[in-house]
Image: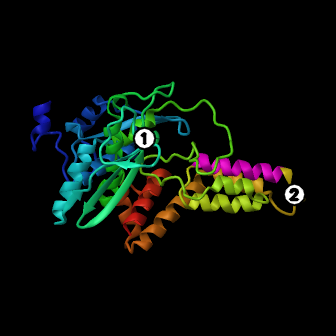
Amino acid sequence: MSTEIATAGGSLAIRPDQTNWTPDQQAVLMQSGIDNQVAPAELSAFLHLCQRTRLDPFSRQIYLIGRWNGQQQRKVYTPQTSIDGYRVIAHRAAAEASHSLGYEDTLWCDPSGKWRDVWLDDKPPAAAKVTVIRNGMRFSAVARYSEYVQTKKGGEPSGLWVKMPTTMTAKCAEALALRMAFPHDLAGVYTAEEMAQADNPAPAERHLRQVQPGETDQWSTPAPGQAATPQREFLREALDAPDAAAVRLIWMDARTEGARPEYLGQIAAVGKEKAAAAPQPAAAESASADDVVDGEVVSPEDEYAAAVAELRAAAEAARLEDFETGAEQALGMPITDASVDAIRALAVQLRNAA
């Protein structure tokens, strides 16, 4: 089988004009760990992504990994590659555009906030920073160790994060920087280093607590490719707000800046507490702020519509034409099939590149 994969004219070769997987290709994909829970749209999107990135799934350059999704009650399949695959795509894209491509020295940060160009401590770094230079333009990204580390059930690091935490954190930062520098070529696919944390055991329960000044909220850690935790302390503002109506406005600002659903849920919980404590008007007069905020948080339709609106605004700011076609090409699938996280990730990339 390896000879067949390596041969350009073999039955597993992906053609640029191909619209569906051939029976031979699909049989090999199923043997690689993809089961019959995979949706046809996920397989079609994966084919399009393989064609766009020109990475070969049969040579293990790109994968389709299934992870259980409690909301959908099935495995949801996400494409991912290694950092080497990212580098191949970036170098190829730069060469085809006649652009130069380079890096500044990788930096690591200690818990006090001091940056170093070499990490000699036995303990993991707090973060890593990588700067990619494409045709003279700098694209810098920071990856925090705590946001990407793969852990066991007890919270201890696992896998390569035990042996090489410095290298793994730097790889995540490099992937973020490369995706900023090459948003079209790398949209819709994440590195294995970034996605390692997706397999972390979920906490048993989550409690609303007051975030201390200067402290990052523990439930607002973004998924790979999603917007980072907002700079404003929205939860603090909500706690200090005079009433539920003010909390609702704060919640809307947090959503616009890309806050995660868990963080939005905490803000909504504050609004519900304030609404319950306030004198309630007659039901016929108006809906309570509790209903409005809570409904907006849990509604997938509203979340999706807001993400599309953010992407459209980012595309307009970047002066991109033909929104529907461009979004489909960048996402690797029709925008109606894309997840909220993927849409928001693309919006962030467009804003950064604008």
Residue 15 in the image: x percent, y percent?
18, 50
Per the rendering, the mark at residue 145 is 1
Q: Nearer the viewer, residue 10 or 304?
A: 304
Label 1: element kind: helix
- Give the amino acid type for the residue marked by disc 2 in the picture: Ala
Q: Which one is nearer the viewer's eye here, 253 or 127?
A: 127
Question: At numbered mark 2, what does the secondary structure look like: helix, strand or loop?
Answer: loop
**Label disc, if present, on residue 283 of the rendered structure:** 2
Location of residue 121 (image quadrant): top left
- Identify the residue at horizontal 24%, vertical 40% (top origin): 57
* Magenta stretch bounds: 261-276
Q: Is residue 352 left or right of residue 261?
A: left
Q: At which x and y percent is residue 190?
A: 35, 46
**Point 76% across, 61% down: residue:** 245
Give how far across and how far down residue 216 sits, in percent: 56, 47
Write the residue at 70% across / 59% down: 248
- Number of numbered labels in the structure image: 2
